[in-house]
Amino acid sequence: MGLNWRLRRAGQSPEGFAALDLLWPDSVTIHPHYVKVGDRYLRTYAVVGFPREIEPGWLLPLMRFSRPHTAIFYTRPLATQDALAQMKRRLIVQRGSESADAERGRMADPLVSQALADTARLQRQLVRGDARMVETGLTFSVWADSLEALEDSSRLLISLTDSLLLVLRLLRFEQDAGLLWTLPGGLWPDNLREMDTAAWSCAFPFGGDEVTHLRGQIWGDHAANPSWVIIDRFQMPSPHSVILGWSGSGKSYFAKLEAIRSRYRNLAVAVVDPEGEYGVLSQAGATVIRLGTPEAGIGFEPFELDASDAGYDGQMEFLLRLLPRLVDGWQERHANRVAQSAYDQGRVENGDPSTSPLAWIARLEETDAETHHLVKTAQTRWRQLGGSPRRGVVLPEFVVYDLSQVSDRMKAAGYLVLAEMLARTTPGSARRLVIIDEAWYLVNDPDTAPYLESLFRRARKWGTALSLISQDFGDFTQNRAAEVCLRNAPLLLLLRQHRDSLHQLQSALRLTPSEIERVAVAGIGQGLLLAGEDHVPLNIWATPAESALLAGTAVTSGGAGYAR
């Protein structure tokens, strides 16, 4: 009915548009307060009152309105001379009204006084060329499948606009015009209002805080609007992340999801699993290596030192950090003896360098029996932790290092060794994601935290992203090295937090009261993602197949859907 009218008004013939019949509804029924388009109901409102002051993104809450809706924003430029002429007439009327009230002894109307001040300020800006004027109009249409749902959506919309100081007017007996304005036919209402370009720029284009990287992977959906949160770690200034959440908030579940989805993109993934939670990833092709068992054989020997290697200094520094974690009674003098013995063994004598990377241990037996005994004890304990050495071991593309059968003390050593092993074996041309769960084992240790800081700085250069998972924000404020790790992680996911840590979070991360409230009462899989300068309320979700895999049940094909 209105289609032919619109085409003729645009100077086009309705002939040749028969294909539109495939899209056009069977019927359009117009009622005083709504329009029924096919099987759906539509109600249109016009905005007739705006707040006096607005700021960038002020329309964002309306764009996030959870019910089906259409927002129509009309705009066209207004000549400066015409705008000044209109303002001049308004000033004459307003000042005349103010003078008449003063002559009659009436109190000045504050609305008129404020309007006079605003009009005069805007007039000066136009004369100086600091602003221009545009004519704008704003209408909202809500859609629903039933009249009851339409009434409910209308009440929610009015409540939302009231909170934004917008005044809505229902288009009574004009719903047909509202339908035409909703369609992309280039039609607009006649009652447009003037707005200066500073205010206009705050509304158009619509601003948002969506995070959607071109080649990323889905982390979840935006809690405030129907959009995906898609992150590419390697597009950030640094690819590292920190995930914090109270026990049971879903942080390990999210880490498993990210591991699976990283494999979709053919990224190598390594997981340091202290509690045996990631064994289910074997169903997705992961190789599970259980440290503390004879068959572990991770293929890394921290006691081998090669003086001819360019990385010799780093090897020695790492070994001296590891030894105190393997034996009791280790002192500074023992470290000096180890360094001296390795140096002596590595020197070139008579033109023949040492060919055995473990020969420094035998030399140590001749010079310091006590230190030699401690080193041999440490070597034995390392064999118990990492298994028998295996030459030529190639790291799998998807591997989980299970530390659940290792004592708490040895876990600290295991964390240290695995981090160093991954740092040495990751090729510079490949990209890898390394997930370290329960990272407080590293960041709370004043000796290993500086090593982790160094690893955070170096990993980016050889294409590795580190993801640290812990429970408490305080874990990253214990020492300077932990704070540096936090500052070098542009991705920070805050799941549900303990009430006692909220004040520290708010002051350190400059979170708003609403953001603090969200992480305080968040459910499982809900939280706040800090991606650079963006703060995004996030809902973590998984497909049915991913949920079944992570639950350890059989994966069956099914329809589309999501399981949070």
Image: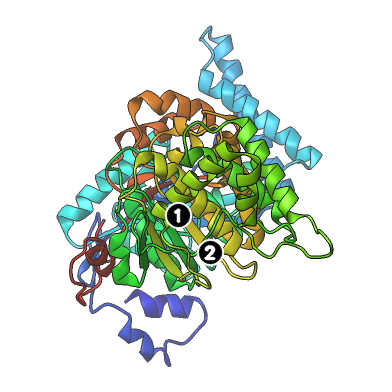
202 horizontally vs 402: left or right: right
Is 266 rendered above or below residue 211? Answer: below
77 horizontally vs 105: left or right: right
Q: Residue furthest right?
A: 350
- Local packing at callout 1 (Cα closer than 10 Å; few below 14, some 14-19, many 20+) is many
Question: In this view of the protein, which residue sits in the foreground, 564 or 84?
Answer: 564
Q: How is the model colour-coded?
A: rainbow
Question: In this view of the protein, which residue sits in the foreground, 145 or 185?
Answer: 145
Position in image of residue 172 (x %, y %): 29, 52
Question: In this view of the protein, which residue sits in the foreground, 268 or 92?
Answer: 268
Is 30 rendered above or below residue 95? Answer: below
Tell me which residue sits at (30%, 53%) in the image.
276
The alpha-carbon separation of the residues under discs 1 and 2 comes to 10 Å
The kind of secondary structure element at disc 2 is strand
Amino acid of disc 1: Ile
Examine the rendering and report whether any part of residue 555 can be seen: yes
Across the whole image, how many numbered discs are drawn on residues? 2
Name the image quarter holding the C terminus. bottom left
Position in image of residue 320 (x %, y %): 60, 42
Examine the rendering and report whether any part of residue 492 can be seen: no
Amino acid of disc 2: Arg
36 horizontally vs 13: left or right: left
**Residue behind mark 1:** 435
Position in image of residue 36 (x %, y %): 23, 66
Tell me which residue sits at (65%, 52%) in the image.
360
Name the image quarter holding the N terminus. bottom left
**Residue behind mark 2:** 432
